[in-house]
Amino acid sequence: MEILVCIKQVPGSNKVEVDPVTGVLKRNGADSKMNPYDLYALECGLKLKEQYGGRVSVITMGPPQAQAIIKEAYAMGADAGAIVSDRAFGGADVLATAHTLAQGIKKFGKFDIILCGLQTTDGDTAQVGPEVSEQLDIPCVCNVKEIKGVEGDNILVDMEMAQDIEHLKVSFPCLITVQKDIVQPRLPSYLKKKDTEAREIVMYTLKDMEDQNKNNYGLNGSATQVQRIFPPTSDKVQVTWDDPADVLAEKIYSTIKSRKLLG
């Protein structure tokens, strides 16, 4: 069974800079990590491999330094990795991102199951996975809370809906987005990290794609445009009071009431 997990490098904190011209995050030099939701998808892929055999590959779209999360995936047990990276891909919305990833996946190989985290902590749209499946013309199941197992050329999953749980049998190839806490992600192995230090990471650029039309990628290929984006401002104010208990109680009550937290 060939399993592919889509992963993404995201900012390690909310203290990030925004390009005032393009309105996109400045990722170069910023602390980063693997998207937490993708860790659950990767663990699901590794468990399927352990139970049914096959290979787990990972793919990411981002700047060259995003290779760091592929190496992290290797240290967790992934067998192969690819990064889709080109300046032409920068500033993509969910549509252009999905198109780019789909093109990279087609180049990377044929897969029975593609696993994605439910969403990312930077974009938070939960749309890229389903759009990738549309680009690849394969079935998609989102918000999966449990993978029950594999039967022949089908996978059995439980999908959480607003009012109930749907039990589904989905034929290969398919794409699945998984909830957080579906499994407990394993920690990277030091021994695997040492063993995979020299393992190849495939790099794909625009010239490697089946579709080489620049107008379908990055800002040019984005159907939506962000009007304004800015980092969150902090309104944290810390005040220290050193008074008797009855005075402190009155101050606290007055403060809460003035902020209309009490009726």
Image: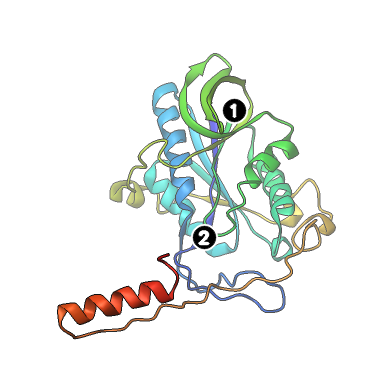
Label 2 or label 1, whichever comes before in sequence order:
2
Tell me the quarter of the picture where residue 185 sits: top left
Q: Disc 2 to disc 1, how far (Cα)?
A: 27 Å
Q: Position of residue 142 (x, y in %)?
A: 59, 35
Q: Position of residue 240 (x, y in %)?
A: 26, 84
Mark 1 burial class by Cα count in 10 Å: few <14, some 14-19, many 20+: some
Above-or-below relation of 208 to 232 = above
Question: For mark 1, what is the residue?
Answer: 112
Tell me the quarter of the picture where residue 33 sits: bottom left
Q: Quadrant of the C terminus?
A: bottom left
Above-or-below relation of 176 to 259 = above
Q: How many marks?
A: 2
Residue that appears at 76% across and 63% down:
225
Q: Residue pushed farthest front?
A: 263
Above-or-below relation of 121 to 1 = below
Say whether residue 126 is left or right of residue 69. Answer: right
Question: For mark 2, what is the residue?
Answer: 10
Residue that appears at 49% across and 72% down:
30
Say whether residue 138 is left or right of residue 159. Answer: right
Indicate the secondary structure of the residue bearing disc 1. Answer: loop
Kind of residue indicated by mark 1: Asp
Residue that appears at 81% across and 54% down:
216
Kind of residue indicated by mark 2: Val
Q: Position of residue 5 (x, y in %)?
A: 53, 41
Pick whichever, 215 or 207, lies toward us.
Answer: 215
Residue that appears at 60% across and 57% down:
123
Colour scheme employed for the rendering of this structure: rainbow
Pick whichever, 209 or 69, lies toward us.
Answer: 69
Confirm or deny contact between disc 2 and disc 1 (CB under 8 A).
no
Indicate the secondary structure of the residue bearing disc 2. Answer: strand
Say whether residue 205 is left or right of residue 6. Answer: right
